[in-house]
Each structure stands twice: as structure tokens, then as C-alpha cells.
Amino acid sequence: MSFELDASGIKIWFEVQNFHSWTEENRDEEWCVCGYRFFTPGRLNCYKDHDAIMECAEVEELEQALTALLEDRISEPQEIGFVEPDLVFELYPKKDKRDDPQYLYVKPGHEIQDIYLEWRVYFWNRGLTKNYL
């Protein structure tokens, strides 16, 4: 499974290989091979290829969470993290801006903020750092 998109000039690619069934008894022994790349010619080239950074169960949980977000079945922000701390996904459901004290005025027709996702890729330097893309 893989996807690729262009996000305002940044080419984003994510791939999961070796996904297979698992049981609770062997959950922590069943890993997928993953890769990602964030690329803009001459400016950005952040990637990881063929690395076991997600358990098969975690891939399935991420798929279920993303599906729930797309189908408007979450009402509060969710953070999806993994055993290996390389990636974190922040899921944000639709929000009525009129209920948010941050906004003093909301133009009619712009009351609802659509769903969105933040995908954080954490960097390593002699261990995991707090720096991320």
C-alpha cells in the first residue's frame, strides 16, 4: 500500500509493505516495512526507506482512525503514536468556529472548519530529538 501527493510543491510519499494478519499474542513480533519521503528539488529531501517502524497492528489502527476522521466519526482531536517514535499523526475533526472563543467573528458560510491532519516526522541525533518536520 502506498500513496503519493503534491502538497503545495512538497512531494509526499508513504509506503507500507509486508502488512499481514496478526494476533494479540504475536502483536509485538509482526512488523511492516515502511518508507516515506518529503521532497522539494533543491530544498527538502527527508526520507526513510525500508524500515520496520510500524507494527502490523499499528498500521491497522492508523487506517481505522483515518477512516473515522474521513467519515466524521471523531469529535475530539486524536494523537496516533507508535512503538517506534518516528511518526505521530494528529487528527482534527470538523469544528464549529462559532463555539471557539478564539474567533470574535465568523463570516457566514465559513462557520465550519474542515477536518485536517498533522503528520510529524521526528528526527534522530544520538537518540530521538524534539525536532520534527
Image (cartoon, rainbow, N blue to C red):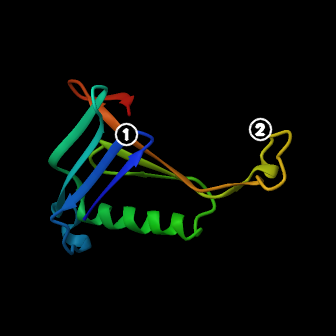
Relative vertical location of residue 80 with respect to residue 45 in this rendering, above or below: below
Q: Amino acid at mark 2?
A: Gln
Q: Quadrant of the N terminus?
A: bottom left
Q: In this rendered view, identify the residue nearer to me: 126 or 97.
A: 97
Q: In this rendered view, identify the residue nearer to me: 118 or 40.
A: 40
Q: Residue at x 60, y 58 (%)?
A: 93
* Residue that mark 1 sits on: 10
**Disc with the residue nearer the chain's start (1 vs 2):** 1
Relative vertical location of residue 51 with respect to residue 132 in this rendering, above or below: below
Q: Which mark is residue 102?
A: 2
Secondary structure under tag 2 reads loop
Q: Where is residue 78 drawn, in percent x and y?
A: 52, 54
- Left or right of 44 on screen, residue 113: right
Q: In this rendered view, identify the residue nearer to me: 80 or 102.
A: 102
Q: Residue at x 15, y 62 (%)?
A: 29
Secondary structure under tag 1 reads strand
Q: Residue at x 24, y 28 (%)?
A: 127
Q: Residue at x 23, y 59 (%)?
A: 16
